[in-house]
Image (cartoon, grey):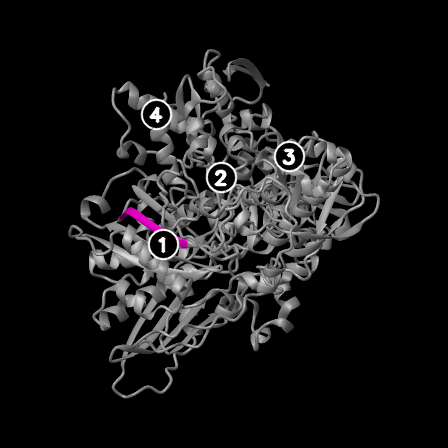
Amino acid sequence: MPKHTFKLNGETVTVDVEDDVRVLWVLRDILGVTGPKYGCGINVCKACTSHINGKAFNPCSVQVKDLKETDEVTTIEGLPDTVGKELHPMQQAWLDRDVAQCGYCQPGQIMAAVALVKKVKAEGRAITNADLDSIRNVCRCGTYSRIREAIKQGSTKM
Amino acid sequence: MTPGATRDEDSVVTTDQHRTPTDGVEFEDEQEAVDAAPGGLGRRHFVGYVVAGSTLAVAADLTTGAMPADAATPAAGSGTPIPSAPQIAEAYDLEDLQTQAALPTSQLITIEVDKDGVAHFALPRMEVGQGITTSTAMIIAEELDLPLSKVQVSLAPARPELLFNQLTGGSNTTVSTYTPVRVAAALAKKRLLDAAAILLGGQVALLKSKEGIISLPGGGSVTYGEAAAKAASPSTEKVDVTLKKPSEHKVIGTPRNRVDALDAVTGKKQFSMDLAVKDALPTMICRPPTVNGKPKSIKNRAAVLAMPGVTHVATLPTGVAVRARTFGQCIDAVRALQVVWNRGTVEGMDDEAVLKQLRAAQLPLAVPKVPILAKTVEASFEFMFRSGAALEPNCAVADYKDGKITVWAGLKSPLVAQANIADALGIPQTNVTVNVITGGGSFGHKLFSDGAIEAARAAKAFGKPVKLMWHRCDEPRQGRSHPMSTSRIRATVLGNSILTFEQRHTGVSTDFRHGLGERLTNLAADLPTGLGNLGFSESIFLLTQELGYNMGVVTQLLTETKNQEQFPTSSVRNIYSPDVRTASELMMGKLAEALKMDPVEFRLRFLKEERTKAVLRKVAEVANWGKTMPKGTAQGVAIHKEYKGATATIVELDCRPETVNRKIRDAVTGPRVMRATIVVDAGLVINPRGLEAQMMGGVSDGIAQALTSSSHLRNGSFLEGSWDNFFYTRQWNAPLDFQCVVMKSDSEQPGGAGEAGVASSMAATAAAYWKATGTMPTRFPILHDQTPDAFEVKPFSPPIPESPTDGLQYTY
């Protein structure tokens, strides 16, 4: 079986698995990293949102062979380390606003929010309602209003 | 303070103003309270049990606990409203039924205090996001004088000895467990104080307990952990216990964050599919192309078994199961399987054919004799199928060995799951262990154990543990839905009075075979006259529906098609109420028009109860009812009364073309609720922040059901196969301004929260659409006939789509 090497949450990992297995299953079923959730498997619900080289991506829609050895994958578990703290400011904002209900979508929501805020900041502007409307992550509990508030708060600390 | 859910100082629940310092122990004579409410919720003296063990374990006996609410006396409206006789739900509702069903076994609710001073409680209910582990921990922390961090609430596995007392539904958890949990916690504290008195050599009356430490002024202190072993009892004893007065509450009624919030935001919160059960490999099912089809034969079993990662293939009653190293390989195998299928249960049928069945089943409207000059006002509505799926799909872990099975799953009715799994495998129920895992949402979906039964069958067929999960595409197509229904209403108006109000609700059969039915059977003899003779769903309908208005002769009746096997259905959040209330509230709009009255003024005139009027007045004030709105936008208002409480919602809806026609890829934008204001009176509130969260979720649900969210039956199959087909509220549909006001309540009884926000927000959105466009909507969701244009239907064979490979092109 082919071996695949990439960086996951700061550590180099190597997995022995067929080329076409999507990264979500490599993370969850082989490496036991369960923060990214399955909600559709077709890059729609965004519950698995994680980062690749600092940008948001959906591992359900990327084959493991497309990861390079130098690619750095960050899941919710590795997010705090990216800022060298116990919690990323976006996670703290999520706690302050008590956003989560069932919590299933929230790792993906937080990872999407961090990437969105970084993108908006790189464009030299503050987050707008139009930016927030562009978030595709589904929350079936309907926590959307608290998510919006938390992102606004989190963005001020990033 | 939760942002976006501002709490009005006059109206919110705060305990500050009636708090008294209670550092110490209080066992003073409280005979007054007992006399004030004999046998009722105001009662504060109870008997509990200290259970034999090596550390402190206490249990509550509640056979003399909460009794159903007294029959409400309808307040006669002043002036023109003609008082309506009480409907059944006013005197005895679903909450009472569930609470009463819980009584005989509540003594088995047990709290243990360990050597570290941590209180442990296994809640015989399921956490699905509604916040009951948090609110229950708060209740225990309150009576035990413990910090919230020292209370651990877990979910109890299926406990057959609880009989019917292990069903999570009807927003009933806190209503039915509030008293027994407090009794057990208060008893634990009493025993700890007794033990501390011996350890410290002082009198109990002098001891102070605070934050898990008991101190004797001037004489040292012990922790709960130190006292727990001493408080343990070698034998089980009966002990009298007195609960705190509501005025002493320091935790109950204060806004608290969820106890599992940190785990949720760090990815540590474990759902069923996150559990590491040895050898439990991913398993998925290849499902039929039409609703409820059954597998006949597999044409390429050997080829599929030879695919990478695949370990097992087996035919189950619902499809063909495949087990593989990864779920990705299960998806590939499911897609590769060539299965011959038997016909489904609705072959060739579409939405219109079901509507035709419903119209044929409708009960006649039979207006009683009214004066000849009375004017008749009529309306008729249709409510389409809606998938009840949560974001976490149906899933379960199962391990079968030597005639015994252990299952891990999110189950709201674990006892029924246990019995069904035993039946499915042909083993005794005692050989089935069912562990209840926190669910990634439910909305009614987890009342049934479809995934757990399949996992159990697969584990037995394979002789290997499995981690079985439904594909997203399976959920709207083969999963349980909110049944399609119609609602017809006829009212008669004479002068300024409404003489009659008749509502006939007709639906595809709602599946209640998850245990509520058993409770009803069990309790039938005790139900108000006539109820015992009704079918289960008709009983649930009567127990939940209460119009709440004085409109002379009021009747609300349900008929369901008697074909339970035809469609997979279930209760979905708030069961019948979103549809029934949307129909009746739109009718109120017509009646207000007929009487030339403002919708709020009309409701205040005709509503029966002060609590409902109060939430309506409040929402009108906070949302600035009647303000000038630009053309194409409007406010809509609605009330709802259920779960021992009331809500009122006002939304501002933007139906202008530039909003409706916003372009977002693979989305339905449509009219947008710009602002939503919901006011809730939920009686005694345990956690206002959690209640606000549930109202927020209810509003998201109400918006979806009013505008965009439905399934379409075409040629025996549901078209939807993705969250980009089934248009639940997304960020681009969410209100830009959400506000929830929690009313202050003198009630000592908690009401329901989880479902309470849906009905009035759906109805208010529908009313706003009417006002903004000038057309009263009669089919729901309003965009039902347009949403299929917004997506390409995924193939039915293979039944699930391939995972894309181009994800790196969409990074941001």
| Residue B37 visible in rendering | no
Amino acid tagged 2: Arg
| Relative height, residue B460 to residue B802 (above, below) | below
* Amino acid tagged 1: Ser
Q: For the magenta stretch, what is the residue range?
A: B672-680
Task: Look at the numbered disc 4 and give the secondary structure of its residue.
Answer: helix
Chain ID for label 1? B
| Residue drawn 36% across the image and 54% down it | B761
State the mark number for residue B212. 3
Whether discs 4 and 1 lie on one chain: the answer is no
Of residues B552 and B473, which is closer to you in this image? B552
The spot of residue B718 in percent (x, y) is 44, 52
Q: Which residue is mark 4?
A: A155
Tell me the subunit letter for badge 4: A
Percent coordinates x, y for residue B551 in the rendering: 35, 75
Question: Mark 3 Cα within 10 Å, few/some/many (few <14, many 20+)?
Answer: many
Q: Residue at x 36, y 40 (%)?
A: A145
Mark-to-mark CA distance, 1 and 3: 42 Å
Q: Earlier in the sequence, mark 1 or mark 2?
A: 2
Which chain contains the residue that carries disc 2? B
Residue occupied by mark 2: B256
Residue B638's disc number: none
* Image position of B165 with respect to B111: above or below: below
Instruction: Tell me the amino acid under the disc marked 3.
Output: Gly
Q: Secondary structure at mark 1?
A: helix
